[in-house]
Image (tube, rainbow, N blue to C red):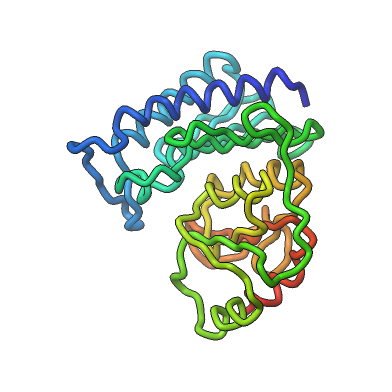
């Protein structure tokens, strides 16, 4: 894995993120809804279009997949995956925790993951074997080793059972929301200890498969299995994720079960 390719991916992500700022908190932003009920805006489509142009211009033989446009199949053996705005609900309500995500896999597996947070001016990026970086500076997960006082974030409490919530509270875990990829960025940079989502699409989870391990953390499905393997019976949101500093991971899986 070459560092110049990671740097290129970060530059592209920042450019796409800067583009979205033109719509952020704009009074005339129009929000539409896709067939699955999830929101989409003109900013989503424009950011993905820009990333596709940048990738195809530099690597015309690479495959490109994205949330808002059809796949472009290449021949190089490399695949880029784009989520132009992760956290569109946050974006459309003027909440600055939204991000744009970029992932690349090659013949050896997950290779590059980027979480760019345009409104916060922050980027978390990782390359296989290169480490994880925040703003170009090496970063890593926390060393918290007790559930009591540990900080866990989630995108929402939808689908949580009363028993699950009770177990988390009784264990003394500090629970926060407004998550999306922002929560995983916080785990990778050691500012919180864990993040979880019960249902994700491939473009939501793909960058995390590089970022969390390179930051020294761990990511699995809610059942403790390979996070890259579908674990949800849903046509689009097939994945689940629990990400942590690794130390607390098995204890968190027990808390979140059922």
Towards the viewer: 196 or 205 = 196
Towards the viewer: 84 or 173 = 173
> Left or right: 80 with respect to 227?
left
Residue in the image at 73% along x and 58% along y: 226
Instruction: Kindly give the residue lying farthest to the top in the view shown.
Output: 57
> Left or right: 12 with respect to 105?
left
Residue in the image at 73% along x and 49% along y: 141
* Snapshot quadrant of residue 256: bottom right
Image spot of residue 168 (x, y percent): 60, 76
Towards the viewer: 137 or 183 = 137
Image vertical order of residue 138 relative to residue 146, above or below = above
Total tally of numbered discs in the picture: 0
Image spot of residue 160 (x, y percent): 50, 76
**Quadrant including the N terminus:** top right
Image vertical order of residue 71 relative to residue 151, above or below = above
Instruction: Kindly give the residue lying farthest to the left in the view shown.
Output: 28
Image vertical order of residue 201 relative to residue 258, above or below = above
Residue in the image at 37% along x and 49% along y: 90
**Quadrant including the C terminus:** bottom right
> Left or right: 91 with respect to 229?
left
Image spot of residue 201 (x, y percent): 52, 52
Residue in the image at 28% along x and 38% along y: 25
Instruction: Kindly give the residue lying farthest to the bottom in the view shown.
Output: 163
Image spot of residue 66 (x, y percent): 48, 37
């Amino acid at each position: 894995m070459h560092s110049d390719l990671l740097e290129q991916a970060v530059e592209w992500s920042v450019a796409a993120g800067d583009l979205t700022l033109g719509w952020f908190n704009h009074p005339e932003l129009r929000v539409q809804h896709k067939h699955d009920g999830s929101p989409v805006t003109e900013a989503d489509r424009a950011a993905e279009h820009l990333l596709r142009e940048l990738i195809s211009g530099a690597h015309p033989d690479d495959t490109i997949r994205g949330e808002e446009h059809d796949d472009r199949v290449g021949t190089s053996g490399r695949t880029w995956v784009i989520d132009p705005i992760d956290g569109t609900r946050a974006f459309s309500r003027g909440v600055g925790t939204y991000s744009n995500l970029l992932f690349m896999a090659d013949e050896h597996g997950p290779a590059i993951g980027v979480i760019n947070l345009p409104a916060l001016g922050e980027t978390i990026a990782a390359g296989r074997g290169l480490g994880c970086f925040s703003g170009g500076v090496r970063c890593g997960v926390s060393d918290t080793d007790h559930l009591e006082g540990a900080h866990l974030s989630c995108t929402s409490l939808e689908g949580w059972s009363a028993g699950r919530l009770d177990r988390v509270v009784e264990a003394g875990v500090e629970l926060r929301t407004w998550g999306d990829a922002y929560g995983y960025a916080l785990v990778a940079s050691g500012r919180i200890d864990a993040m979880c989502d019960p249902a994700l699409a491939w473009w939501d989870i793909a960058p995390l498969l590089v970022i969390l391990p390179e930051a020294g953390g761990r990511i699995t499905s809610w059942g403790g299995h390979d996070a890259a393997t579908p674990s949800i019976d849903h046509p689009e949101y097939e994945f689940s994720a629990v990400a942590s500093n690794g130390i607390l991971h098995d204890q968190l899986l027990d808390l979140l079960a059922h």
